[in-house]
Structures are given as structure tokens and as C-alpha cells.
Amino acid sequence: MFSHITLGANDVEASRKFYDAALGALGHQPGNPSEVPLPGVWYMTPRGMLGIVKPRDGQAACHANGGTVGFAAPTPEAVVAFAEAGVAAGGTAIEDPAGPRTTPFGVLHLAYLRDPSGNKICAVFREA
């Protein structure tokens, strides 16, 4: 459905460290620094891209109130590893502790974090 997502960052290097750790725990490669199309770092998979960038308008980055970017986790253990790696790399754990939750969509393994710029992200594993 999505080709890419970009998130604003006030400190791209702090965000790169955070995303390299948190996404690395989900099996993704470190980000690639780039000046094009915006100064930042890009994470690429065969299905899409995530850009962590300085805002184009030169203003401070801020998080989207009510917005969350979710990353697919391959296992329940990867959800916990994502949370631990993200916190160790400068993120903040929010909401309930990482783990299983009963939802209207079935049991989901979830971990919610705020990145160094305040963006809300999560890792999710859906049981079959």
C-alpha cells in the first residue's frame, strides 16, 4: 500500500542511531545517509522506504499527534528486542510494556516507542 514514509528529525544522527538499533532488532540493515531528496537517512526494503529527514521548510520537526508508524516484526521475541534496542539507543518506551495484547483483531504482540524527535512508532507481530 505505501511506497515510503518520512519522519522529521531535529537531530538526524541521534535518530539514525535509534532507528539503526530498533529496526536492526527486526532484521533490517542500517540506514543510508543521503542529502537527496532531503538531508537525512533512508531505510530501504524491497517493499518500501523510511526516511528520517530534516524538515524541508527549515522549521523544527514535531511528531504527528495521533500518528503512529508500525513496523512488522517476524516473531514475538523481535517485538521485545525492538523495544529494548530502541530504548538503549535513546528512545522512550510508552504505553504498556512490550508483549502480547488481546485486541479486536486477535492477539497482537506490540511495543510502542517515541524516537528522539518524539515520533510514535511500534513493532507488531500478529499471531496466525
Image: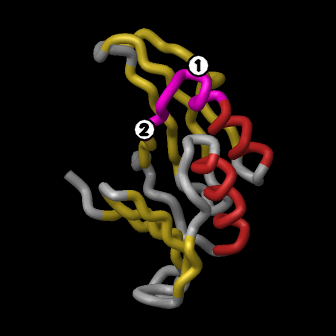
Task: Give the percent coordinates (x, y) of residue 115.
Answer: 63, 54
Task: Give the percent coordinates (x, y) of residue 59.
Answer: 53, 83
At label 2, which amino acid type do we have? Ala
As for residue 100 lying within the magenta part, the answer is no
Mark nearer the N terminus (2 vs 1): 2
Q: Which residues are magenta?
A: 72-80
Q: Residue at x 76, y 53 (%)?
A: 90
**Label annotation for residue 18:** none
Say which quadrant the C terminus sits in. top left
For the image shown, how many numbered marks are present on the structure? Answer: 2
Task: Give the percent coordinates (x, y) of residue 45.
Answer: 40, 58
Q: CA distance from mark 2 to mark 1?
A: 14 Å
> Which mark lies nearer to you, 2 or 1?
2
- Other-residue count near label 2 (Cα within 10 Å), few / some / many at <14 / 14–19 / ≥20: some
Residue that carries the numbered disc 1 in the rendered image: 99
Front residue of 23/63: it is 23
Looking at the picture, the colour scheme in use is secondary structure
Residue that carries the numbered disc 2 in the rendered image: 72
Task: Give the percent coordinates (x, y) of residue 10.
Answer: 63, 74
Q: Residue at x 40, y 12 (%)?
A: 107
- Other-residue count near label 1 (Cα within 10 Å), few / some / many at <14 / 14–19 / ≥20: some
In this rendering, position of residue 124 left or right of residue 86: left
Q: Residue at x 43, y 48 (%)?
A: 69
At label 1, which amino acid type do we have? Gly
